[in-house]
Amino acid sequence: MTTALITHPACLEHDTGPYHPENSERLRAVLAALEAEEFSMLLREKAPLATIDQLARVHPRAYVEAILAIQPELGQPIQLDSDTVMSAGSAEAAARAAGGAVKAVDAVMNGWARSAFAAVRPPGHHAEPSRPMGFCLFNNAAVAALHARVHWGVERVAVVDFDVHHGNGTQTMFESDPNLFYASSHQSPCYPGTGAPSERGTSGNVINVPLHPRDGGPAFRAAWSKTILPLLEAFRPRLLIISAGFDAHVADPLAQLRLETADFAWITEQLVALADRHCDGRVVSVLEGGYDLDSLAASAAVHVRGLMRA
């Protein structure tokens, strides 16, 4: 058993314009780090286009079709909101980002990989059912979770999120379904302003542990070991999906948490061990945030290294 790396060159063609933090250099940095010799055993696959039916499990079909229909002229990106941009290549990139998450699920459910990392962009966890926001167009992790349920019959799916920003979109999509579990550690106060501990979902299936600005590894590890991981154990997922954002790193410019690269290695180890106990080792990870190129590359590398030990 080994680890799959799912990506596609089209994800580099989502052009957010000069000075935008969510730019193609992020993905280039991650992929360059994964070219090191230690990653030579990765099974490298191209992300397919997600189908409209796959996307419409978490987004209204009219929304999906509207996003895919936005095809700006080359070099003339359009602003959907103050943070979220679409260019000539964005619709395909977004469809392949979600499709990459779907293919990652197929890889671990088919059994040709034990774990999978979808190195894709744009990210997804802020995308709400009918609203793009926070750099996100489609909710990649949620699309993957519903694909696991509908196509593979997985009854209980968990998405866990250690991005520095709360995954408001994933929470909205999961909170009323007792067989879907969403857990997040994130900085508060911070964008998007959601993720209070009182937000628990209709069945206690949502867990939020806000961290204070300048909190570091000890607070992060306590949030997971004392709160999130025990509740995730109790949920007993049959598939674990990680929204893997690396912007809680001390070097990241968009927030003020102070994690080190070793903290991402630690949480990966914990999640892989839990997947061994409950999911037959099946774990899927989908890239979310991370905006300092060096820390993003290093953190993604230790994360994938941990997945390879699954």
Image: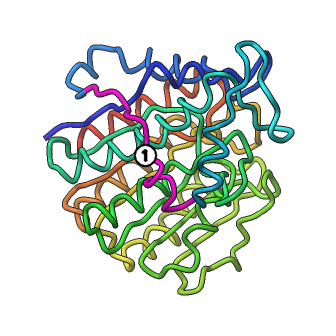
Left or right: 243 as drawn, with respect to 40: right
- Which residue lies most toward the bottom here? 203
Measuring 23% from the left and 41% from the top, which residue is drawn there? Answer: 309
* 222 in the magenta segment: no
> Closest to the observer: 294 or 240?
240
Measuring 47% from the left and 43% from the top, which residue is drawn there? Answer: 98
Counting other residues with Cα less than 10 Å from the Cα at mark 1, is it few (<14), some (14-19), or many (20 or more)?
Answer: some
Left or right: 129 as drawn, with respect to 179: right
- Amino acid on which disc 1 is placed: Thr
Local SS, label 1: loop
* 52 in the magenta segment: yes
Measuring 55% from the left and 20% from the top, which residue is drawn there? Answer: 12
> Closest to the observer: 102 or 263?
102
Determine whether 295 is above or below 276 in the image.
above
Which quadrant holds residue 1? top left
Measuring 15% from the left and 42% from the top, which residue is drawn there? Answer: 112
Which quadrant holds residue 179? bottom left
> Closest to the observer: 83 or 62?
62
- Find the magenta span and give its range: 44-59
Counting from the top left corner in percent of width and height, residue 219 is at 62, 57
Counting from the top left corner in percent of width and height, residue 201 is at 60, 80
Picture mark count: 1
Determine whether 280 is above or below 70 in the image.
below
- Which residue lies most toward the right here? 82
Counting from the top left corner in percent of width and height, residue 264 is at 48, 42
Q: Looking at the image, what colour scheme do you see?
A: rainbow
Determine whether 152 is above or below 200 in the image.
above
Counting from the top left corner in percent of width and height, residue 95 is at 51, 38
- Residue to which mark 1 is pinned: 51
